[in-house]
Image (cartoon, grey):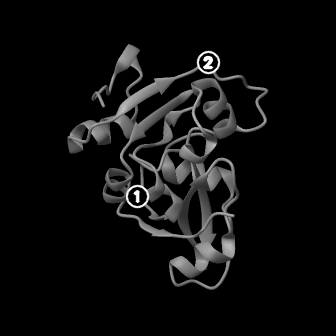
Amino acid sequence: MARKAKKGGQGTPATVALENAGVPFTVHAYEHDPAAESYGGEAAELLGIPSARVFKTLVAEVDGTLTVGVVPVSGRLDLKALAAAVGGKRAAMADPAAAERSSGYVLGGISPLGQRRPLRTVLDDSVLDHPTVYVSAGRRGLEVELAPADLVALTDARTAPIGR
């Protein structure tokens, strides 16, 4: 994979974090349609890749603490499983404004990488089934492809079955 942090002026905190870490990655851009029902589904379709390899970043609250769950776009986040993965009892989706403030990204463009305030992160264990995966590069219409091990390392994540 090529290291491309600023292809066409598209550098984001996520791509800068990857570049600074010296991790190989590729940026994939597509024309985002504001009417799209699913940001991740749109990315998979327009980039022509299986939806199981495209992961969405969701911010939840587990026992009052913001926590990131990263699951395939073809599935859903299992909030009970997310809570259990971090030793919590209750989980709910975070307030969208709180997710944006904490991450520094807008909804539909929240990346697990380069967040303003790094949060504890759990990746669905299916991430390990692929040679490379795609996550938001920090902007709607921009995905970054990288090795799952690099994603785990850079987000200091644990993996667990949190998708359904």
Q: Nearer the viewer, residue 124 or 110?
A: 124
**Vertical side of 39 occupied by 162: above or below:** below
Q: Is 30 in front, or is 148?
A: 148
Residue 130 sits above or below residue 163 on the image: above
Give percent across and percent down for residue 90.
Answer: 67, 80
**Left or right of 39 in this view: 122:** left
- Per the image, the residue denoted by label 1 is 118
Q: Earlier in the sequence, mark 1 or mark 2?
A: 2
Counting from the top left corner in percent of width and height, residue 102 is at 51, 54
Residue shown at the point (59%, 27%) measured from the top left: 48
Query: Residue 31: which disc?
Result: 2
Which quarter of the figure has residue 2? top left
Of badges 1 and 2, nearer the viewer stands 2
The x, y position of residue 76, in whole percent, is 70, 58
Q: How many marks?
A: 2
Q: Residue at x 68, y 48 (%)?
A: 74
Q: Amino acid at mark 1?
A: Pro
Mark 2: amino acid: Glu
Classify 164 as above or below 65.
Answer: above
Q: Secondary structure at mark 2?
A: loop
- Residue at 57%, 83% (x, y): give it: 88
- Regarding mark 1 in the picture, which secondary structure is present there? loop
Q: Is residue 138 above or below residue 82?
A: above
